[in-house]
Amino acid sequence: MINIQEIYFPFCLIIFIYYYNLFIKTMLSKIENKNNQLRICLLFFLILACGCASFKEEQSVYEERTLTTIYNKALNKLINKEYEDASLEFDEVERQHPYSPWAKKAIIMSSYSNFKYAEYFKAEANLKRFINLYPASEYTSYAQYLLAMCYYQQIIDVKRDQSSVFLAYDSFKLILDRYPNTDYAKEAYYKIIYLENHLAARELRVGLTYVSLKKYISALKRFKNIVNNYQTSIYVPEALHRMVEVYLALGIKEEALLNSRVLGYNFPKSKWYKFSYKLLRKNNIIYKQNR
């Protein structure tokens, strides 16, 4: 069988040399200085050499190999923590043997390799593609978990953009809903608790900023969001106390009293309950609930 690459490369080389010579003759005819002529010749020779080397390198990258050869090489790279090279080799498994039973697993392994050397965007793209192509695969639950972990690893402090937090939160929630009996669900549960604290901390910070600006309605929305949506968060007691403060600032004593009772019922030993109690007494509000 005729190898097209064996014909294509010499043909391109002949065409290139022809136009190269034509161009050189034109350029040299316009240049009188022999030193400049020599420099130009050397420059184009280097360009030609680099081009040939690049072409040959591409040929070697796409060299056809057996499935076992590629996969074993990829695994060895992974074991040796050469994650970038490992991901490229796993990609070759899918590229050269797309209908092999190992192709699906190679996508997962490539994604894991990308994850390990912090190429999260590449890992995300591969994992999303896998989940869309193989929603019922035995590896899909792990793919969903690894996708959530990609988002999780990109979380930054509460003062900056939180898009990765929301993506991770939703992804871990999805794992709990779809794969409740897996080990990934247990891990997702603890990650969700951490993320709820992270999101609640941000809401509390924004709410306190609104209080300092005397934008009480906006502050209330933030504190209510903590109480209603992040109920496992450690910031719920403080959010309830801040609601008491805001309602008193607005002159809505009934709501202040109601929220202090909720705080006292759920967190009777919290310092925030004690703060709310003292605040209500200071404002001469009848407070019948026992501490």
Image (spheres, helix red, strand yellow):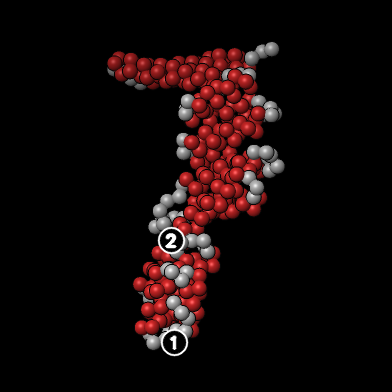
- Of callouts 1 and 2, which one flags the residue occurring earlier in the amino acid sequence? 2
Is there any visible trace of residue 284 in the rendered image?
yes
* Side of 141 relative to 39 (left or right): right
The percent position of residue 280, horizontal first and vertical second, equals 40, 81
Residue depth check, mark 1 versus mark 2: number of the one nearer the observer? 1
The percent position of residue 116, horizontal first and vertical second, equals 48, 36
Q: Nearer the viewer, residue 217 or 146?
A: 146
The percent position of residue 219, horizontal first and vertical second, equals 44, 72
Residue at the spot of label 2: 201
Q: Nearer the viewer, residue 234 or 66?
A: 234
What is the spatial separation of the Cα atoms under label 1 and label 2, in whole angstroms? 32 Å
Q: Which mark is residue 286?
A: 1
Image quadrant of residue 39? top left
Amino acid type indicated by mark 1: Ile
Determine the residue positioned at 51% across, 44% down: 150
Secondary structure under badge 2?
helix
Q: Considering the image in quadrants, where does the N terminus appear?
A: top right
